[in-house]
Amino acid sequence: AEETSFAAESSFTRAPLNTRIVGRQAGLSPAHAPKGKGKEKEVEPASLKGVPLEVQEALVLEDLLYVLMGIPGTYVTVHPSYDPEVSGDGVQFAPNPSLDPSLRDLVQRILPLATYYTAICAFIENRSALECGLVNHALCASIREMLNKDYLTLLAQLEHQFNTAPGFSLQKLWFYVHPTLHTLSLIWSLTDELTKADSLGEDNEDESDEEVDEIDAIDEELGLAIGKKGKLKALDVLDDAGIIKGGEVVAVLWERVTNMSGDPSAHELYLTLFRQASAPYADMLQRWITTGQLKDPHQEFMVRESKDITRQILDRDHTDDYWERRYVLRDGTTVKGSDRQVGVPRPRTEGGRLPGGACIPPLLDAWKKKILLAGKYLNVIRECGIDIQQPISQSDSSDESKAKKRKKDGKDAKDGKDGKDEKDGKAGKDGKDEKDEKDKESKAKEGTAADEELKSQMTPKEKEVIPLDDERFYQAIEDAYSFANRTLLRLLVKDQALVPRLRSLKYYFFLSHSAYIGGFFETARAEFIKQTKYASLSKLQSLYELALASSPGPMEESFRGDVKLKLDMRWSLWDYLADVLSVEGMNGDDAGLGAAGRDGNQTGDERKGKSKPSKDKDVMNMNVIDGLTLDYTVKFPLSLVISRKNINYYQCLFRFLLNLKYAEQVLTDMWSEHKCAPWSQTAPHAELDRWRLRVIMLRTKMLWFVQHVLAFVTGDVLEPRWRGLEKKLDKAAKDVEKGTVDQLLEDHLDFLNSCMSACMLTIPKFVKHYSHLLHTCIRYAAYTSKCTRSLEQGAIAIASGDTDLTTSPMDRRWEMFMKFEINFNHTLKAFIDLVHYNAMSDVTLLPLVHRLSGGRPTF
């Protein structure tokens, strides 16, 4: 009884889903039972043999209306070979084998529409997960909107036709759904490509994980704390590498837009999907270039942020990590384009596109460096506590001027009208008052309307999300980059006084006004001959400040409080340069100075995990002059230009000049002593006098060498290059519109690299010869007092009547002297030969060749 009443419920049996359930009560056996996890025995489909053709068509029509929504029918059922676990390809349907061939052929033409629809629905369901990212969510929303607006609306209309129109047939159904079949096939081909790309990414990720696991196993055996996999995870390289999202989805859509330009309907469809799906990407990009804020929770954007690198590391950063690696492009491209960053994920296929945010859409590839720099510049400005106010674009400013003009024209017209009313007011006072009230009301309304219009047009443009394919978008990128670059350049050059700061570095580190350095040497002479462990840094600092105060200096001396003396207790200049240049992989141009740790005294071998042989004995014997250097304190944002890496270069050049100046000073003091007796008088003994002259000649030769090298370094290397840098800085200060911040940083670094290279401090052999020659000169000057005593003793012995000097004292004199002379002459000859050899490929050494060849003393 319940079954009879249940079947008689027409409203229930006509319901779309329940029709499938009560088909057996209506005399129709269900063709396909729902599949669960366990396979159940399938029910044989009902046969249509003997059923009239018109009835078959009606039955199939009813089934198709449900099948097109993904619901299996009675006579159009799921294909036996379909696997429900694989939903990405869509559900495959098949008509009843007993269906009339003419109808079956038409049904088979319509069934791909159901497959496309189910595949697209499965794609939307899978890509709506949180980890798929905002671009996938926007794409799914756009496709869902198309399905709801077009496809499901069409099915509702077709169902209405089926229920109300007696002449509705299978041919008419095919006629109505045929255009939609093409649209869904285009959407399905897109979703299919994205789904297959996921599978490629998963395969590569599995292979990469296996390889990385093997490397990590080796690292564990070697006792290393962190393996390659941990480092890659820290760089967000292995996270969700298999999911196609972000920029990669935008790139796929744009590729289809360009490839389908010959098919207007396909081009329009993909263009609509592209604009709606890329809206979150465009929003992230616009926020980045207009405010410097990076909001990318799913790693979809082209720029990656290293949050562990903050401005606080600038005080100890010797590698420019803050500027170079705080914000980078995910595809590994650098601003200079000379090398690639680490942490770039593998392409999905060999030579194919990069996954996720590392894939930069082709239409933005030419702008990626400006996009990166615009956000980086704004970030620096934001971290300085400065509010960023983007200027109104040209289109906005033109609209604003038009609104102002309309407001002004309205005001002039009303003023003219008021004047006319006042002129005609003599005709009747009542008419005038009434007209004035009307004019005031209209004037107030028009003024309010104009104000609202002007206010609406002055709304910041970044609130409007411009499509990526719009020409205005590229203009917005250019405007944002120009604004960010101009603002930061003005902040550095004008507000932060960059040029006077760099001039102060030249004054202190390059000894450009070195009148005070002689006084410093005189007052600190006793400290210089001490070993570093016995020296008083506070006393040296006081003497240095006293020397600065006693010598008039330029305006740059106002930054004196930022300059402090520093004692390197472990490394002399020559040991430090030799250690840096010995690091494997360092070339002469970069010299690796920024990579070497100064505060922690980290050597190249220690960075490679090896232990450096102990040099405690040399450290104990190192004098103050070998470890003395300057340190310079600078605050953010000037620390971007005057970074610790660049200060390292300045320190190396300062210590080199200080060694040359000190050698010149002690040799000059030796010359002053040789002008007095007993050196200025001929010795009474021929052998003793010959020894006296040889001592004087060697001192002259040493002083000649030191002065010529010092003149070459200051006059031929530092000063011309500083003039070139100063000209660029002055040009940037006068016209901030034309210069760029990165060009400024590059010019400064090139200046330092060029100075180091031209001074030959990047070639190990030159460093070795410099160290040997200067140490020999300084030690020889320290030997002067012994020579003077020896000469006086010889003169006294002769004056006392002992004309026949014993050979033992004279031999000791010659033995000690010959050690200095042979050592110096041999090293000097090797140095000059090396200069001549390198001058054949480096023309900057030609002035030194001329100095060492033209005026060489001959004795």
Image: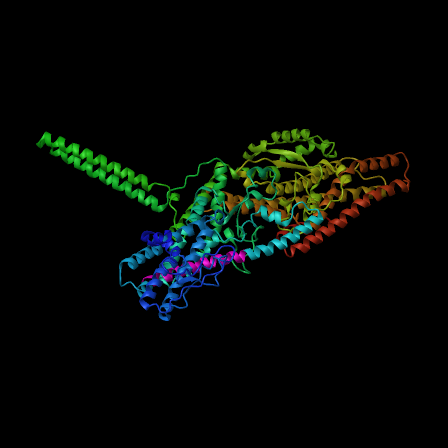
Of the pair 153 and 204, the residue shown nearer to us: 153
User: Viewed as shown, does residue 122 lie left or right of 600?
Assistant: left
Which coloring applies here?
rainbow
Residue 91: % across, % down: 44, 59
Residue furthest out toward the bottom = 101
Number of numbered discs overlaid on the protein picture: 0
**Pick the front one: 778 or 821:** 778
Q: Is residue 447 visible?
A: yes
State which quadrant residue 103 falls in.
bottom left
> Of helix, strand and loop, which mostly describes the magenta segment?
helix
Is 673 left or right of 211, judged from the image as shown? right
Magenta-colored span: 176-201
Residue 567 in the image: above or below residue 603: above
x and y percent of residue 736 in the render?
45, 43
Residue beneath the point at 68% across and 34% down: 521
The foreground one among 47 and 153 is: 47
Q: Nearer the viewer, residue 192 or 135?
A: 192
Q: Is residue 783 left or right of residue 521?
A: right
Q: Position of residue 619 (x, y in %)?
A: 75, 38
Q: Is residue 273 magenta?
A: no
Can you give x and y, in whole percent of width and height, for residue 580 in the image? Answer: 68, 46
Specify whether residue 196 is painted magenta.
yes
Residue 69: image quadrant is bottom left
- Vertical placement of residue 41 versus 829, above or below: below
Q: Quadrant of residue 508?
A: top right
Taking the spot 39% from the left edge, 44% from the top edge, the residue there is 462
Q: Is residue 720 visible?
A: no
